Image (tube, rainbow, N blue to C red):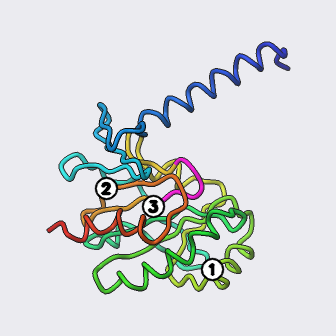
Amino acid sequence: MSLSRASRAALLTAVTAAGGLVLSACGGGNDSASKGTSNFVTDTGGISTVEAGQRRATGKLAGETLDGKQLDVADLKGKIVVMNVWGSWCPPCRAEAPHFVKVSNELKPKGVEFVGINTRDQNKGPAIAFEKDYGVEYPSLYDPAGKLIVNGFPKGTLAPQAIPSTVVLDREGKIAARSLMALNEEQLRKMIDPLIAEK
């Protein structure tokens, strides 16, 4: 059964509108900060945060890493976890990779762990080459179909919605901050430093 041109256009319009609503529910305008009924606050730098008492835990984020090992993010509870969604085919991911490597190496002694979620690479080869080229030593879960991204972040939380996206979990494993763009070192530290300061 095929859809008429008018039906396809109407469907595309509805999907686009729904997508815009999802993104606008979490995002801010041009104000220095905005807060709606979502309990998310987004600053002009595009970083959304949730106050400690309003944070929610992730779903299950576990599976095989690019190097064939098993990883469950829940085992990192007690540490701050920076989760970066990336693909080897993604130019902004390449641009941010050196910043992630530098910050991960510098903050590991402070109890900060980095975990990648590699997505939409249909085989591991290009992703493994990417990690080698940029000196990425932290693990990345292999998620070619995006199942971890869809199922690992409950509806109504700061879920990754773009590639690259970065989500930071507090020491209790709860979602504390998110960015939907490539980050430099300063922006990345802006997401992490407030959580290091939390006791």
Q: Which label number is shown at residue 176?
A: 2
Residue identifier under label 3: 61
Amino acid marked by disc 2: Ala
| Predominant SS along the magenta part | loop
Residue identifier under label 1: 131
**Which of the two residues, 159 or 41, is positioned nearer the viewer here?**
41
Residue at the location (45% across, 48% down)? 159
How far apart are labels 2 and 1 at the CA level?
Answer: 26 Å
Amino acid marked by disc 1: Glu
Q: Quadrant of the C terminus?
A: bottom left
Mark 3 is surrounded, within 10 Å at the Cα level, by few (under 14), some (14 to 19) or many (20 or more) other residues, namely: some
How far apart are labels 3 and 1 at the CA level?
Answer: 20 Å
Callout 1 secondary element: helix
Amino acid marked by disc 3: Leu
Q: Are marks 3 and 1 in contact (CB under 8 Å)?
A: no
How far apart are labels 2 and 3 at the CA level?
Answer: 16 Å
Q: Position of residue 61 (x, y in %)?
A: 45, 61
In the rendered structure, which segment of residues is drawn in magenta? 161-166
Q: Quadrant of residue 77?
A: bottom left
Task: Name above or below for residue 102 compared with residue 13.
Answer: below
Mark earlier in primary sequence (3, 1):
3
| Front tag of 3 and 1 | 1
Instruction: Say if the magenta span includes residue 163.
Output: yes
